[in-house]
Image: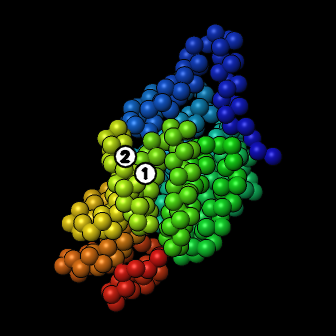
Amino acid sequence: MYIDEWGWFNDFYRSACIAGDTERQQLVTIWNEAWHYIQPEPDRTLALINQAHALATRLREPCFRLFYDYWRCEIFMFYKYDYAMALDLATRAVVEARKPEYAHCPFLARTYRILLDAHIYLDPVGYLDKAREIIAYLEAEVPMGMDTARLLQDRRRTLAFAQGDLDGAYQVALRFLEQSQNYDFYLAHAHSLLCALSYTLGKPEDALKHAQESEIYAQQSRRLRVSMTLYCWQALINQKLGNTNTARHMYNTAAAQSTQIDPPLPSSYYTVLAEYHELCGDSATAADFSAQGLAHIVAQKSPYFECEGRLERCRLLGRLNQPTLKDDIAAAHEAAKKLLKPDLYLSRLARVEQGIYTDAW
């Protein structure tokens, strides 16, 4: 039995309206304004969240304090891509959430889930045991909404992928897709995951179908960053399939949409387009996009994403026969020191040093 997180939210607002309590109404209306700016202007959303958090503190509304603690973490995780800050905020939020006054709060499970996300996005292999511990605790001890239950499935997909179980990750992503029916927001995410996995597994036709589906749902749910990334994927996949005119159109569309979004852009914007330019035979532009993407990834302060980004760049430079490959391999080895358990990553890097630049994982 899942709890109705947003039902609580809406009931609170109705009660505040009936009581004529304008300040408590603001705890809801500020969020509605903040959500409007969450994708194009995350800093503006963050400022509104901080305003509402201060109001919840003054009004002694612990569940709204926790609500805004959670969303502050979400902003840093998925819109500002600062995973180190997200982990710090999520750890503090969970410590606060363990106090008795939060036991009945509908967003309690989400607070634990965002702590799980921060660990996974920083180092899913190194924090594997911690991630499994949080998932087990959530499922056994904390009432959760369907959104949280659905996203736990996706986090299992992340853990499988990080360990090299691509087929397992694909199957989990399919289950996530099944659970996402009738929810455009999650359908966009599920199809985007299946697009990337299908491409990695050498199934470009399947990847293109998922990219097209994801774009539709991303548009319907106003997920501008996802939509832009899906245009990048369609440019790459169409180029790979020989549909050069369509590929160029999708590339131009992605570039135009990128100007409507505040930085930072998703790192996948750069990494996918780096491979697109490689397929177009433009080595210099491919290397430049790769460098920009890596710079964004490093700024996220995630050892896992940095290592993955450096590995992918080394493979690209190897395929392009770039003279800087040796230096990039050295930098990749240095980045490995930040991982808690680097052996798996180092084994993949060793294949690059052997001249194997086309591994699927």
Q: Counting residues from the N terminus, which is met first, the one under dot 1 or under dot 2?
A: 1
Query: Which percent across, then down, holds residue 5?
Result: 68, 37
326 on left or right of 214 = left
Q: Is residue 75 above or below residue 238?
A: above
282 on left or right of 32 = left
In the picture, the disc for residue 129 is none
SS assignment at label 1: helix
SS assignment at label 2: helix
Q: Residue at x 36, y 81 (%)?
A: 357
Amino acid type, callout 1: Tyr
Which of the 4 image quarters holds residue 67? top right
Q: Is residue 176 above or below residue 69?
A: below
Which of the 4 image quarters holds residue 283? bottom left
- Colour scheme: rainbow
Residue found farthest to the left: 323
Q: How far apart in space, not on screen, are marks 1 and 2 (Cα)?
A: 7 Å
Query: Would you name the residue on which mark 2 appears?
Result: 253
Query: Would you name the residue on which mark 1 appears?
Result: 231
Q: Residue at x 20, y 66 (%)?
A: 284
- Disc 1 + disc 2, Cβ < 8 Å: yes
Query: Which percent across, then down, holds residue 225?
Result: 43, 45
325 on left or right of 74 = left
Q: Is residue 337 above or below residue 82?
A: below
Q: Nearer the viewer, residue 143 or 198?
A: 198
Q: Residue at x 48, y 60 (%)?
A: 121
